[in-house]
Amino acid sequence: MILKFLHFSDNSLKESRDSPTYDRLWKIRKIFDSFNRRFKEVYDPTENVSFDEVIIKFKGRIHFKQYIPKKRKQWGLKMYKIADATGYTYDMRVYLGKDKKENLSTSATYNVVNAMTDCIKGKGHKVFMDSFFSSPELYRNLLKEKKINSCGTVRPNRKHFPKNLAPCKMKQGDLAVKFCNGMTAICWKDKRQVYMLTNMHSPRNEFIIDERERF
């Protein structure tokens, strides 16, 4: 009964959906933002953090509900988050659909990572992410503008990623590495080719592949 009538907004202040400032999250915006502020007030993240998307299971009626068939929870709200290595959520943002105000010269994934990492800029953090977000352009900007090193899997068709990194034929366990201007690109052959990108490791580092600890 409490959950049925729990409310965090004043309906009389609701903006028209046609308004350019209309917020699809307006019903919980105040408490959502208060959580984000409190996350930062009570905890300083460690050196290593991750950036990722998560799906919050939800099957109700809402305009920004997402269907992602490859996720275990296929229907729900998509949320981006920065999490500490301990699992602590340091910052979060709900995906509300295409943002008409975002920079069109860069991708939507680039824009969301670039915007959300403002809360950890200039502190020497290292951020880990998967191929959905990774790109050489993003990694260079995070290091140059925010002093944030990056590492993660990457899609080989990303702009500025070396096209001829991996030989045509690689045996399981083979490793191909290229280094340029502080950026290391890696291709490792397991059952398939896995591509990685980092600006916190050099090709002089020793790479140890353990079958029990695959990517």
Image (cartoon, helix red, strand yellow):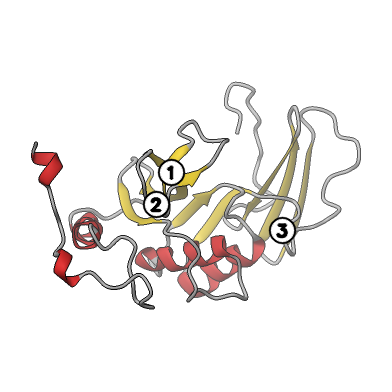
SS label for mark 1: strand
- Circle 2 packing at 10 Å, graded few (<14), some (14-19), many (20+), is many
Q: Which element is circle 3 on?
A: loop
Mark 2 or 1 closer to N-term?
1
**Dot in front, 3 or 1:** 1
Location of the N terminus by quadrant is top left
**Front residue (pair 212, 109):** 109
**Residue 76 pos. (x, y %):** 41, 42
Other residues around mark 1 within 10 Å, as few (<14) / some (14–19) / many (≥20): some
Pick the residue in front: 139 or 147: 139
On the image, numbered disc 2 is attached to which residue?
A: 81
Picture coordinates of residue 88, whole percent (x, y): 30, 44
Location of mark 3 (residue): 158
Looking at the image, residue 131 lies above or below residue 15: above
Q: Which residue is pictured at 72% across the width and 58% down the height?
A: 158
Query: How far is mark 3 from mark 1, CA to CA?
Result: 23 Å
As shown in the figure, which amino acid type bears the numbered disc 2? Answer: Lys
User: Could you tell which of marks 3 and 2 lies nearer the N-terminus?
Assistant: 2
Q: Is 132 positioned to the left or the right of 170 in the image?
A: left
Left/right of residue 182 with respect to residue 4 in the rendered view: right
Q: Which residue is mark 1?
A: 54
**Amino acid type, label 1:** Val
Amino acid type, callout 3: Arg
In the rendered structure, the answer to whether residue 70 lies left or right of residue 167 reads: left
Residue 83 percent coordinates (x, y): 37, 48
Which residue is painted at 60% across and 68% down in the image? Answer: 140
